[in-house]
Amino acid sequence: MLRMARKNIFGVRKKEIFGYHHTIPYTDSRRMWQRLFGGLMSYKGVTIRKHLLNPFFMPIFFREEWTMMIMIFASFLTIENPFFIFLYLFAVILRNKKYIYKGKYIILYVMQRIIQDIFVFLGIFLFYPKKMSYKVFEIM
């Protein structure tokens, strides 16, 4: 959609279901570790790097990755005063406020967001994925 938006071709959302997407349940404690060791958290950094100068991507970036931007800001301010790291922790807790009311998996969601912010930030500069190779089988 972002490549098309760059050429002023915008998508239209439909109500109909085109397909189902199967994911690991959000409450599964193995989810974070599978995403971390599978490299899935770093691919978001590649997307950010690729579309960083796209004006249609900026609102999406600020809406989805505002905790990462606070992490960067708080990291610089922590040099002066170590209490600025609590600004970032407060932002992560604020981002996960809907899980606080459920009372379950709070620590898991906070840890997952902190690790995701670190890996996305590192992925912007350090992660370069390998080219995927596909095997095509012909059925006769």
Image (cartoon, grey):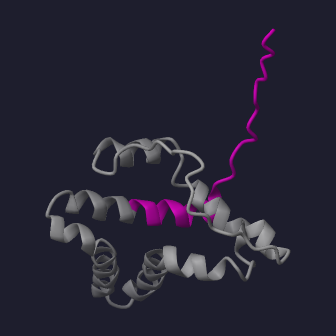
Q: Position of residue 99 (x, y in %)?
A: 24, 67
Q: Position of residue 41 (x, y in %)?
A: 51, 54
Observer-nearest of 39 and 139: 139
Q: Is residue 24 above or below residue 124?
A: above
* Location of the N terminus (image quadrant): bottom right
Relative to the observer, which residue lies in front, 138 or 18? Answer: 18
Asked if residue 48 is among those painted magenta in the image, a careful observer would answer: no
Q: Quadrant of the C terminus?
A: top right
The residue at the point 27 percent across, 50 percent down is 27
Q: Say how many tags the image has.
A: 0
Left or right, 80 with reference to 126:
left
Q: Residue at x 17, y 64 (%)?
A: 102
Q: Is residue 30 above or below residue 4?
A: above
Give the residue displayed 50% in from the left and 59% down from the top: 119
Give the quarter of the image for residue 81. bottom left
Q: At 61% across and 64% down in the image, what residue appears?
A: 14
Is 19 on the left or on the right of 112, as rendered? right
Residue 125 seen: no
The residue range painted magenta reads: 115-140
Camera-side residue of 85 and 35 = 35
Position in image of residue 111 (x %, y %): 30, 60
Extreme left residue here?
Answer: 103
Residue 113's quadrant in the figure? Answer: bottom left
Q: Position of residue 62 (x, y in %)?
A: 54, 81
63 left or right of 90? Answer: right
Residue farthest to the front?
A: 16
